[in-house]
Image (spheres, coloured by chain):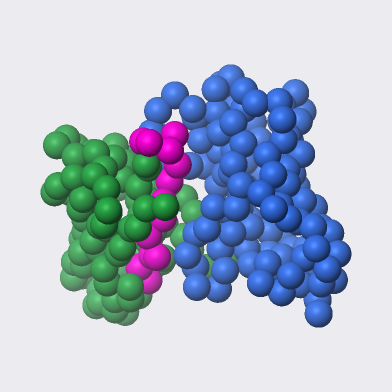
Amino acid sequence: GAVVSQHPSWVICKSGTSVKIECRSLDFQATTMFWYRQFPKQSLMLMATSNEGSKATYEQGVEKDKFLINHASLTLSTLTVTSAHPEDSSFYICSVPLRDRGNEQYFGPGTRLTVT
Amino acid sequence: AQTVTQSQPEMSVQEAETVTLSCTYDTSESDYYLFWYKQPPSRQMILVIRQEAYKQQNATENRFSVNFQKAAKSFSLKISDSQLGDAAMYFCAYRWGGGADGLTFGKGTHLIIQP
């Protein structure tokens, strides 16, 4: 299988500040990556599709100015939560589809964000 | 838009017995994939099994098998010989088959294994 990493695994930030979360595909290149959000005891919700070389595609209801996505290279996508609020506290997970396996998605270990 | 429904928030089974988790979905597409993912307390998503909609044969992976009823839009997961390590959240998920789309997840079922 493929290996996907996320950094940091846990971050605490103050309200009003911005925080950046990285998603890296360690052993294959990916033109597309996905970002999900998971609130406690809830399911994963797709937030956006990160596209290398072009703008991200956001799901309905996701504020693109608040959740900035940059697909910097074929192995790195970043999610920046701007002007964070306590309600942004959540578990953020990225996934990477592997084209050679029918776009089967490989998930990162997730990042727990706590906004105080 | 596609939806995925898991109607069992929690299920409990005795170790070594069999349990079935339910999932229904709604889509107007004919080309799609269905998945069952396991999320243990570590929260790492682990693929359990996948089913291509065009395949009539039900997918199996060791102790895990599915009952895919395309006309009924039902996709249940059967776990045989349940083990303590099977305890986790299980999510049913859908993806359109036409490209590299994101997944639509159900709300999940918390599976408890009684020793």
In the image, B4 versus B82, the foreground residue is B82
Q: Is residue A116 above or below residue B76?
A: below
Q: Nearer the viewer, residue A14 or B38?
A: B38
Q: Reply above or below: B72 against B82.
A: above
Q: Is residue A52 left or right of residue B33?
A: left
State which quadrant residue B33 falls in: top right
In this view of the protein, can residue A90 be seen by the observer?
A: yes
Of the pair B65 and B68, the residue shown nearer to us = B65
- In this rendering, position of residue B28 left or right of residue B83: left
Q: Colour of chain A?
A: green
Residue at the spot x=75%, y=23% of the render?
A: B71
B91 w.r.t. B5: above or below: below
Tally the marks: 0
Would residue A65 be visible to someone looking at this image?
Answer: no
Quadrant where the C terminus of chain B is found in the figure: bottom right
Residue B20 image point, x, y percent? 80, 53
Residue B51's spot in the image, x, y percent?
62, 36
> Residue B28: x percent and y percent?
59, 21
Residue at 72% from the left image edge and 30% from the top image edge:
B57
Q: Residue furthest front?
A: B62
Q: Which chain is blue?
A: B
Q: Residue at x 40, y 65 (%)?
A: A109
B69 magenta-colored: no
Relative depth, front residue between A110 and B50: B50
Residue A109 inside the magenta-drawn segment: yes
Magenta stretch in the rendered image: A99-112
Residue shown at 31% from the left, 45% from the top: A33
Could you say which quadrant of the image residue B12 lies in? bottom right
With respect to residue B111, does B78 lie above or below?
above
